[in-house]
Amino acid sequence: MIFAKVVERMRSHADVAREVLDAAARAMRMYSRTIAYPTRRFIVAEPSTEFVEFLERGTLFDFRDRVRGVCELLEIHPAIVLFDIEQRLRESGWSIDEEKERLKEDWDGQVHRNRVVWILPRFHVRVSELLQDFVHRAVESDRYSAETVASLTNVLRLGDPKWIREVAYAKPRDVKMIEVTDPVAWVEEANAHPELRTERLKTEGWTTLYEADRFAQSDGWHPQFVSDLRVRSLLVPPQIAGAPDRWPEVDQWIADFECRTAEENLTLEEASRRLRATTSLTASDAAEPAPLVVRHFGGQMFVAMRCALSLHPRWLSDLEIRLPEILKDGCVIARVEQWQQGYEDDAYTRELLSVGIRLVAQNRWLSDTLRTSGMALAMSRTERREYDKDFWDDKSDLVAERHSQQVFVP
């Protein structure tokens, strides 16, 4: 406000640039009675302890994440939101005792009668709608920027229409299920720790730059053999390509999408738009390791890809971004694949036997990128294998983990 008042005084004595006047006008608008008042009409009070405790029990984890994201973007304390929700419930005649009975009905009618594992309680739906109503009332005055409102929409978003409508869940043919006949030998294979290998990247075919898989082999009721696979990639300068101890930690190889809050849910279209908007803002430095992959995880209840996944914006300046595909001259040079296949027969667990997501890139494009950037491609592959003879025993009978690293040059 001080800035705006200084500009206003200067304006009467000298010419002020239009950009400065516009900035001052935007600043003053935030303090106008019309704009500022609606954000103060929410009562600043604490929800009852009884309500908060019941909220923990009656809603899924996703609701807490959405409240956190809303509060970060609106810059208000979560207590204000929860108090408003509780008040609106009380005004409608709602009571915790009656809701406990409805929760019991939801559980008995779905889990026991229909043997469904994951249910959406009616209470969760109701408070989610009240949270949306709170957001509508908070932004209706237009006090918040368009970017903030767009981020709030992402926080409250339930699913990605394109993913639900177009993208298949079939497992790629080259991804094989595990077939274990000798438990000891299978687990012992993962105890090997191969040395760093350096190879020339093939010009034909595809390379997996990111992968997160889980494979299980069942005894018909419960998983006995479980394999968790992680693949990560990073571009490194040639002078440190043969020195893994000088590389960043593997968990730092993947960059994050630029988001206003970690609770945003990005659709394929929104992720593509953000990538297109940032391709010209990044530059490469051949003297430092550079991320090749960017990622963002959506909420647990967000019906979409398990994470937004793409090549890093700095490598996309001449590419067409239409996730889950990235194209060059009309041809796909990278794509995201996600799948799930098979369930346990036990309806109370319904555990997936195969689930995964990966980003693959065309070798010819990768070779050109390595030559242009003057970098080498570092790959990390980690696989954890477990054997559980007794599903109900918390401790696995056999466990081993294998970590291997590889470097590709053009």
Image: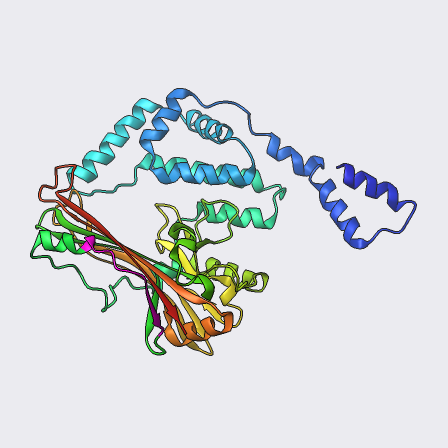
Q: Is residue 163 left or right of residue 16?
A: left
Measuring from the top left, give residue 323's x and y in whole percent.
42, 64
Going 36% across and 78% down the picture, which residue do you hit? 203
Using the rendered image of the protein, determine whether residue 247 is visible from the camera's viewpoint.
no
Q: Nearer the viewer, residue 159 or 174?
A: 174
Front-most of 41 and 236? 236
Residue appearing at x 52%, y 38% in the figure: 72
Please state the horizontal and vertical placement of residue 91, each as a whole percent of the image. 45, 25
Position of 393 with respect to 361 (left or right) is left
Q: Quadrant of the C terminus?
A: bottom left
Furthest residue to the top? 49
Percent position of residue 8, x then y: 84, 42
In the image as oriented, which residue stretches furthest toward the right? 13
> What's drawn in magenta, residue-wise?
190-201
The answer to whether residue 373 is seen in the rendering is yes
In the image, residue 180 sits, relative to residue 62, either above or below, namely below
Query: Is residue 321 in the magenta section?
Result: no
- Is 29 drawn above or below residue 37 in the view shown? below
Q: Nearer the viewer, residue 270 or 183?
A: 183
Q: Residue at x 25, y 64 (%)?
A: 170
The image quarter containing residue 139 is top right
The N terminus sits in image quarter = top right
Relative image position of residue 105 (x, y in whole percent): 23, 32
